[in-house]
Image: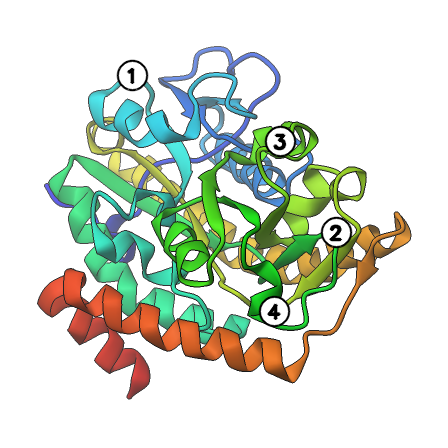
Amino acid sequence: MTISRRGLMAATSGLAVAPLAAGAQARWQFATPYQDTNFHTRNNRLFVEELERATSGRIGVQLHTNQSLLPQPQIKRGVQSGQVQLGEILLSAYGNEDPMFEVDGIPQLVTNFAEARKLLELARPFIEARFARQGMTVLYHVPWPPSGFYTNQPVDTLENLRGSKMRTFNVLTNRFATLIGATPTLVQAAEIPQAFATGVVNAMVTSAATGADTQAWDYARIFTPIGFTFTRNCVFASRRAVEALSERDRQILREVSNAAENRGWEASQKAQVDAQNLLASKGMEVRTASRALLDGMAAVGRTMVDEWLTKAGPDGKTLIDAYRA
C-alpha cells in the first residue's frame, strides 16, 4: 500500500520526554538532530502530545533529541531499516542521494515564505514518491527561517568571503562556497561552536534560529540576513509501522500531521524575528544586506539553478517550470 501525505499521512513525529504511555499499542522511537529549545523540536513535542491525547495513548512515541540516538546522516537509513520508526532530517542534506531532495537549498530560488510554500506544494509529490519507494511515509515539512552570513568582518560583497573557511551543511552550500572562492567544510549544527573555536571554520551561512541555538555571539560578531534559502526539515516514518496502525489511528495521525505542518510554518516565521532580536540583544551586529551583495547572490543563484537542472532530469525541469509559471 502506498501512503501519501494527501491520501494517508499516517505516522508520528514526536517527542515524549516522559516514559511511553502505559498500554500503548504502538511504541515508536523518534530520532532528531536538534536541541530541545529549537522551534522544530517544540513543534514535534506538541505534535506528540496531541497524537497521544487523540489516540488515548494507543500510540506512544519517545523522542531522542540533539543526535542522542542517531547522528543526522544516519537518521534516514535508521528509519528505512527499521532501527527507529520516526525521523527528522534536513532534507537538503540528502542531495547526494537524489537532487529532488535539495531543491529548497538552491540559493535565492525562493526569497520569502509564500514562495517557499509554493515550491513545497509543487515538490511534495516528487519527494513523497521517492520516500514511498524506499518504504517510508512523509509526514510533514517545516522550513527554517531564511539564512544569512555569520562573520567577524562586514560582508558587503561576495568578494569579502573569498578565502574564508565556510561551514556548510549540504551539497548546495558546499557548491556555493566553492563558487565564491571560499573553502567549504561540512559541520553539523551541534558542532558549530567547536568548529569556530578551533579555527576549522570562520564564516557560515545559516538561519538566525541556528545562530541562536548555537550561541553565535560567542564566535561571530556580525549577522547579515540575505534570504539565502528556506531549507526544510522533513519528518517521516517507517511505512511498515504506519500500516500496522488501525484505520482510525491513521486518520488521527493524518490530521495531527497536517496541524503540525501548519503550526511549524507559523513558528518558523516567528523564529526568524525572535532569533534575530536575540542575536542583536547579545551584542551581535545585524546588518542590512547591500545591493551589491544581493546582486551577487542573485547571479550565483542563477548559476546554481542551471547546474541543478542538469542533474535533476525531467522531474527537475517539470518542477522548476511549474514554479516559474
- Secondary structure beneath dot 2 equals loop
Q: Position of residue 70 (x, y in %)?
A: 42, 20
Q: Position of residue 105 (x, y in %)?
A: 40, 59
Pointer 2: what residue? 152
- Secondary structure beneath dot 3 equals loop
Left or right for 86, reference 187 = left
- Relative to 36, say whether 215 is above or below: below
Residue positioned 30% across, 47% down in the render: 9
State the count of labels: 4
Left or right for 253, reference 7 = right
Pointer 1: what residue? 83
Amino acid bearing label 3: Gln
How many angstroms separate mark 2 from mark 4 (CA)? 16 Å
Farthest residue to the front: give it: 163
Q: Nearer the viewer, mark 4 or mark 3?
A: 4
The colour scheme used to paint the residues is rainbow
Amino acid bearing label 1: Gln
Residue positioned 38% across, 21% down in the render: 28
Q: Which mark is residue 59?
A: none
- Relative to 76, say whether 233 is above or below: below
Amino acid bearing label 2: Asn
Pointer 3: what residue? 35
How many angstroms separate mark 4 from mark 1 (CA)? 39 Å
